[in-house]
Structures are given as structure tokens and as C-alpha cells.
Amino acid sequence: MNLAELGVFLRSRRARIRPGEVGLPGGPRRRVPGLRRDEVANLAGASVDYYTELERGRGAQPSAQMLAALARALRLDSDERAHLFHLAGRPVPPPHGHLAHVQPAMLDLLGRLTGTPAQIITDLHETLVQNPLAVALLGAHPRGGGFEASFAYRWFTDPAARAVYPPEDHQHQSEAFAADLRAALGRRGRDRHAEELVARLRRLSTEFEELWVRGDVAVRRRDSKRIVHPEVGVLDLDCLTLLSEDGRQRLLWFVPRAGTDAADRLRLLEVVGSQELGSTR
């Protein structure tokens, strides 16, 4: 661990990012190049005091979760991100799970989708990053690791996960998850994590096993969904997908389905989400 060098590296990465690149207003009176410390802290979900101590080379060893959040806030590429973890004395996370590296270009696109729910997930349905409207619509993704980070895994093993869809839509969603996971497994080749996830699902879920042996395969590129929200009701949405070049990550965004009242419900959701966020501060 080299906290002094870590602080130098953080300062250098902060100085090169322009506010507009991360969805922040610029303004003519900025006194520092790049982002301010408070802006990086806010983007990473850290306190300003904590981030300031990191830049000064002080304080405790940052967690893997904090390092991943800083890498995303500073738009680090894979080499820079690995260097950040090395300086902090942490192992670089594997390319799966909620700490997986997110391509800066995808983060940039996510930051521009401010008026619609959007999130970045892996092809194993592990949520990596959400915008505020996606959190308001779907809830915050779990912070823990393991197979439970995959919504597809929770779908077949935790009945509570299914509350997001009306019961009459569950069969379609189950079929889509199973076919999509088969496509992911084939694309990844000999990927131990993906293989173990599927093997465990086959042991734990009779429903998944029955769907798996059917052999259906289909990448989930676009879908129509009815999302059940406890306060604004059922939203009829189209879910659109942008795949990364290797197919392992996806940017999802949700738009109102034509001929429904989903647009009104999304506007109400934006108000509800802002109120809930304010109540937690």
C-alpha cells in the first residue's frame, strides 16, 4: 500500500476530467483545472473529508468498493483502474460481479440519460451502475458480491425478487433469463464464475432446470416490461439495450410504451425519487 502515491494519482486523474464529461455544469469561475474534490466525492458517494484525506495520502486503506466507485467517478480505463487498486494494496476485482470495471464510454452515455431510468449491467445480470431514476424505479442494487449480485440468480432463488413484475409476466421473464444466460455462457467460453452460477441455479431451482434443458438461447437486446412500483403503480415500458463490444456489459434504458400512461408515471416517479433521496440526507 502506498497512500502517498495514491493521493498523487487521484489528484492527477481529477485534474484531467472536465465537468461536462461527467454531467456537471462548468461555469466561468472555476479556480481549479478539472473537477473539485467535493465533486469527485459526490460522484463516488464519499464524504468530502474522506476523499480529501485520500488525496493527502492519509487515512485508512480504502475498501475495494470505494476504489471501484472512484475509478468510475474519474473515468479510469482498465490499466489506470488496476494501478489504483495496486497503490491501495487491494487485489484487482475479477471481471464479474458488482465491482467489475465499467468502460468510460458507457459511463459517459449513462450520464447523458438524465430523463429516463438507465443502468449498466453485466451479461450475467449483475448491476454495476444506476442513475437516480433507475434506483427510484428498480431499487438500489445489492452491495454484496457472490452469485446474489445477479438479478437472474435472485429471480430463481428468492421469491421476493419477482415483486418487480406482475405475476402473469413471470413465465416470460423466466424464459428470457434462462435463454439469455445460455447465450452468455456460450459467449464467455470456459468462464468458471458463469459456469458455477448456472450449475448452482440448476441445483437450486426446478424451474430453471426445466428451462435450461430445453436449450433455448437468445440475447436479450430489447424487451417490453411492466414494472410494479409500490407508489406509482404499474409502468408499461420498453427496455432498450446497448451492448459493449465483447457483449459482457449492457447499457439499459427504459422508455414509456406508446399508448400508455407510463410517461406520466415516470414524471411522478422522478418526484417521488427526489423526495426519497432528500429524506436520506
Image: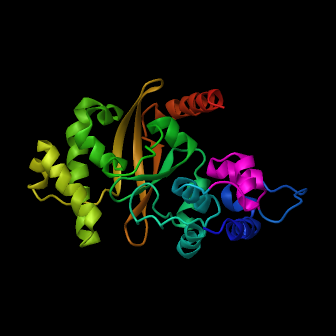
Q: Is residue 41 magenta?
A: yes
User: What secondary structure prevails in the magenta region?
Assistant: helix
Q: Name the residue nearer the viewer: 112 or 54.
A: 54
- Residue 2 visible in the picture: yes
Indicate the position of residue 97 as horizontal and vertical percent values.
Answer: 39, 57
Quarter placement of the C terminus: top right
Indicate the position of residue 179 as horizontal and vertical percent values.
Answer: 21, 56
Give the residue displayed 13% in from the left and 54% down from the top: 212
Tell me the quarter of the picture where residue 22 sits.
bottom right
Q: Name the residue nearer the viewer: 233 or 135.
A: 135
Residue 79 lies, with reference to residue 168, above or below; the image says below
Give the residue displayed 29% in from the left and 62% down from the top: 193
Marker count (numbered): 0
Residue 102 lies, with reference to residue 260, above or below; the image says below
Instruction: Check the image and tell me how it is coloured.
Output: rainbow
Quarter placement of the N terminus: bottom right
- Residue 184 visible in the picture: no
Viewed as shown, does residue 273 lie left or right of 155? Answer: right
Q: Is residue 122 magenta?
A: no
Residue 269 lies, with reference to residue 92, above or below; the image says above
Q: What segment is highlighted magenta in the picture?
A: 35-60
Indicate the position of residue 107 as horizontal and vertical percent values.
Answer: 56, 60
Residue 32 lies, with reference to residue 42, above or below; the image says below
Viewed as shown, does residue 41 lie left or right of 127? Answer: right
Give the residue displayed 73% in from the left and 52% down from the top: 39
Q: Name the residue nearer the viewer: 127 or 215.
A: 127
